[in-house]
Structure formats: structure tokens, C-alpha cells
Amino acid sequence: MKRIVILISGRGSNMEAIVRACAAEGWPAQIAAVISNKPDAAGLNFAAAHGIATAVVDHKAFRQPGMDAQQAREAFDAELQRVIDGFAPDLVVLAGFMRILTPAFTAHYAERMLNIHPSLLPAFTGLHTHARALEMGCKFVGATVHFVTAELDHGAIVAQAVAPVLPGDDEDTLSARVLKLEHRMYPQAVRWFVEGQLRLVDGRVEQLSGASQSFS
């Protein structure tokens, strides 16, 4: 039985999708905890209502006098790692966790931490992905599940979902269309991990059962 810890910063709709899929599909896994860097994250209430342990590591508490931004970030990551490891996870899942993680933190969870990003990586790393895609005149947008590395929004790609850009689309309509795909793709990617269906080879991810790693 694999143990999963999910990190969120807000509602955590992808966390909700993973929790529901794990229960409905009978994965060989347990959602051991949901952890947020924000005490008022709405997703904490959902997790608690489903009997899942919750915890908060408030990043604002680490902004101490005399500390520079990097020192505060490292102190936060160290405490977050301590709390996560208290739940003995096999996999850490970032589901709308809005923090840039330090190299030491990502190294600690190397090859056992997943993230989802709302673009077809390596395009449009960082924020405002849909607005930037519209500005560039992209005809398709999407989302990517990838293993987390120290480089922001990089790491071996597990799966990608593609959606068309339609006439009249704006940032909100694109985001909603892509989010529906994320809610299908991310639970599937997590299930592949817990069932041992993923293998990293030369920086690329192979799906061992031959299932498609693309969604639309």
C-alpha cells in the first residue's frame, strides 16, 4: 500500500480529483495527508471531511527579522519536509502548491514527487500560462504532469493533455477547459506511479503497460 501526501495552496481541485479516484477505483494506495502553506486553504476542509489528516506549514511564519528571502525559503522547506516525512510518503503530489522549492527539498524527494503545470511543457513555464499562450496565438494549449526537479517546471514528463484554443477564448475559458483535462490526467498519472507502471529511462518516462500518456 503506497502512501501519498498531497500539497495544496488553495481549493485543491486536483487534490479532490485524486482523492475521489483513489477511493472509487480502489488504488493500492492511501492519501496519508493533505498539507498546505496557507491556513485558510479551502482544500483542507475537503480533506478533513474525507477523513484525511491535514497539516499547515505557513510560509509567512518563516519571514523573520534578519533573514533574507533565501534563508526564509530554506527554513520553510526544512520544516515542510519534516512534516511531510512524519507521514512516511512513497509519493508527494503537488496540486496547486504555489511555492518555488529549494534544490535540497527537491533532491530529498527525487523521482517520488509529481507536479501538474497548466501548459504543454517546455512551453510557458511559470505563471500566466494561458494569457501568454493567447498572446502568442497558440492554436492548442494543455497541461503536463512531470517529476519535480530543482529547475522550475522541468523534469521528466509523465503525461500531457491537449485542448484546442477556440474563437473568442479568454484566459478564464481556456483555464476551465484545461482544468477538466487535468482532473482526468493527474489521477491517472498518480495511479500509474502507485501501481509501479512508470519507469525513468535517460530522463524520459515510460508507461510500462503501454497506456497512452497523452490526453485530449
Image (cartoon, helix red, strand yellow):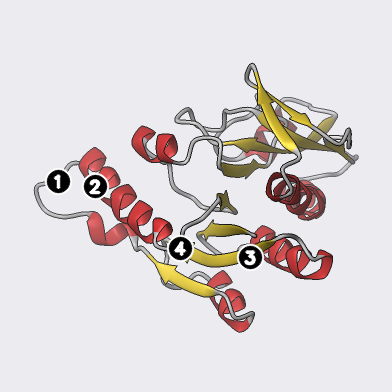
N-terminal label among 3 and 1: 3
Give how far apart the Cα atoms at labels 3 and 2 are: 32 Å
**Given the current orientation, which residue lies at the most extreme top position?**
202
N-terminal label among 1 and 4: 1
**120, 140: nearer the viewer:** 120
Q: Can see residue 103?
A: yes
**Given the current orientation, which residue lies at the most extreme front position?**
1
Q: Are marks 1 and 2 in contact (CB under 8 Å)?
A: yes
N-terminal label among 2 and 4: 2
Amino acid type of the residue that numbered disc 2 sits on in the rendered structure:
Ala
Q: Can see residue 11?
A: no
Q: Which secondary structure lies at badge 3?
A: strand
N-terminal label among 4 and 3: 3
- Provide the residue designation for mark 2: 72
Q: Are marks 3 and 2 in contact (CB under 8 Å)?
A: no
Amino acid type of the residue that numbered disc 1 sits on in the rendered structure:
Met
Quarter-of-image position of residue 125: top right
Instruction: Tell me where residue 101 appears, x and y as whole percent.
Output: 41, 41
> What is the crowding at mark 2: few (fewer than 14 residues within 10 Å), some, or many (at least 20)?
some
Instruction: Tell me where residue 131 appears, x and y as whole percent.
Output: 67, 38
**14, 203: nearer the viewer:** 203
Instruction: Tell me the tag on residue 67.
Output: 1
Instruction: Tell me where residue 181 appears, x and y as whole percent.
Output: 82, 49
Q: Classify 101 as above or below 124.
A: below
Instruction: Look at discs 3 and 1 and give the one toward the viewer.
Output: 3
- Provide the residue designation for mark 4: 87
N-terminal label among 1 and 2: 1
Give how far apart the Cα atoms at labels 1 and 4 are: 29 Å
Amino acid type of the residue that numbered disc 4 sits on in the rendered structure:
Phe
**175, 207: nearer the viewer:** 207
Instruction: Tell me the tag on residue 30.
Output: 3
Instruction: Tell me where residue 5 appears, x and y as whole percent.
Output: 54, 59
